[in-house]
């Protein structure tokens, strides 16, 4: 009888050990599969983050004199900085709304340009016959030429805008909306006219107005796609001077951060100069 009880107890312990081992094995297998899935997902995200981004081809500097509205090689100041960008190899299309550009100088000047602003700060255009056809504001996740949805409640600002050549308002009294003068932008403009349009944007408080110019364009939308090249021209509040060091960072929301460190040439011989090249 005692031997039977001992054998039954041994059997119960043995079965318990088997069940415990099976449960443990199941937990280990489940944990391994979960960790593998997470590792694959993390790896894919890391790969996408590393491969998604913009490549800078070169950076142009324009000697635009805001007081005369001309490109002047005697100015010896860079008032407009323009990186030329395209997608990195293997990158997915990037929404311009997810990109922020930061510019800093050794003298402590700092500029930030982002389309996520509540104010229309960026124009869109495309190159046509060596000139730029302005196609609208990059605003409200689209390219718009009519009402931007940005309301101005200051009558003095509305009146000032109403007389502008390119960036104007739909009323001389408040409330008014920022719009483009579709008559004057119906034909391609030269760069001095484009910069005049940017300068007019300062009338409603934009400190660093800019324009995205599609040099090669597949689809006119909010994305930069494979094969497209854009020039992002930004008008600085304080110009860069010869031998001044500067830094440009291009930051997609989820992607590779591009940084450029450059120095303005000692002598600026032409109205448009390369201030950085690969």
Image: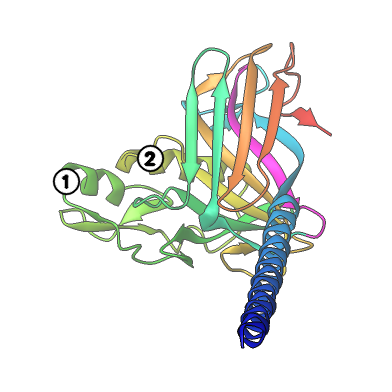
Say whether residue 114 is magenta: no
At x 61%, y 80%, the residue is: 9
Badge 1 local density, few (<14 within 10 Å), some, or many (20+)?
Answer: few
Q: Quadrant of residue 72?
A: top right
Q: Main secondary structure of the magenta part?
A: strand
Q: Is residue 145 above or below residue 276?
A: below
Provide residue 171's location: percent of width, then percent of height: 22, 58
The residue at which mark 1 appears reads as 154
Say whether residue 76 is magenta: yes
**Mark linked to residue 174:** none
Provide residue 108's location: percent of width, then percent of height: 49, 15
| Element at label 2 | loop
- Give the quadrant of the C terminus: top right
Badge 2 local density, few (<14 within 10 Å), some, or many (20+)?
Answer: some
Q: Is residue 49 above or below residue 207?
A: below
What is the span of residues highlighted in magenta in the rendered image? 75-90
Mark before the other along the chain sequence, 1 or 2: 1
Q: Nearer the viewer, mark 1 or mark 2?
A: 2
Q: Quadrant of residue 202?
A: top left
**Mark linked to residue 206:** 2
Q: Is residue 115 above or below residue 182?
A: above
């Amino acid at each position: 009888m005692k031997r039977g009880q001992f054998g039954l107890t041994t059997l119960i312990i043995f079965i318990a050990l088997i069940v415990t081992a099976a449960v443990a094995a199941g937990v280990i297998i489940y944990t391994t599969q979960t960790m593998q899935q997470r590792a694959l997902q993390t790896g894919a995200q890391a790969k996408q983050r590393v491969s998604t981004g913009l490549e800078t081809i070169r950076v142009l500097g324009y000697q635009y004199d805001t007081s005369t509205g001309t490109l002047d090689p005697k100015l010896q100041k860079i008032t407009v900085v323009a990186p030329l960008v395209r997608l990195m190899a293997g990158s997915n299309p990037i929404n311009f709304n997810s990109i922020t550009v930061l510019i800093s100088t050794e003298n402590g000047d700092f500029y930030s340009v982002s389309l996520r602003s509540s104010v229309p700060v960026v124009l869109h255009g495309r190159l046509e016959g060596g000139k730029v056809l302005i196609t609208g504001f990059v605003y409200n996740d689209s390219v718009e030429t009519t009402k931007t949805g940005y309301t101005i409640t200051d009558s003095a600002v509305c009146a000032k805008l109403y007389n502008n050549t390119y960036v104007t308002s739909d009323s001389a009294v408040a409330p008014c909306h920022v719009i483009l003068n579709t008559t004057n932008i119906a034909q391609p403009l030269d760069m001095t006219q484009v910069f005049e349009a940017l300068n007019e944007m300062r009338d409603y408080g934009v400190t660093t107005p800019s324009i995205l110019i599609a040099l090669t364009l597949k689809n006119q939308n909010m994305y930069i796609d494979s094969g497209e090249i854009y020039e992002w021209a930004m008008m600085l509040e304080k110009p860069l001077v010869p031998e001044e060091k500067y830094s440009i960072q291009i930051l997609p929301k989820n992607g590779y951060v591009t940084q450029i460190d450059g120095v303005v040439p000692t002598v600026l011989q032409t109205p448009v100069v390369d201030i950085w090249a690969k």
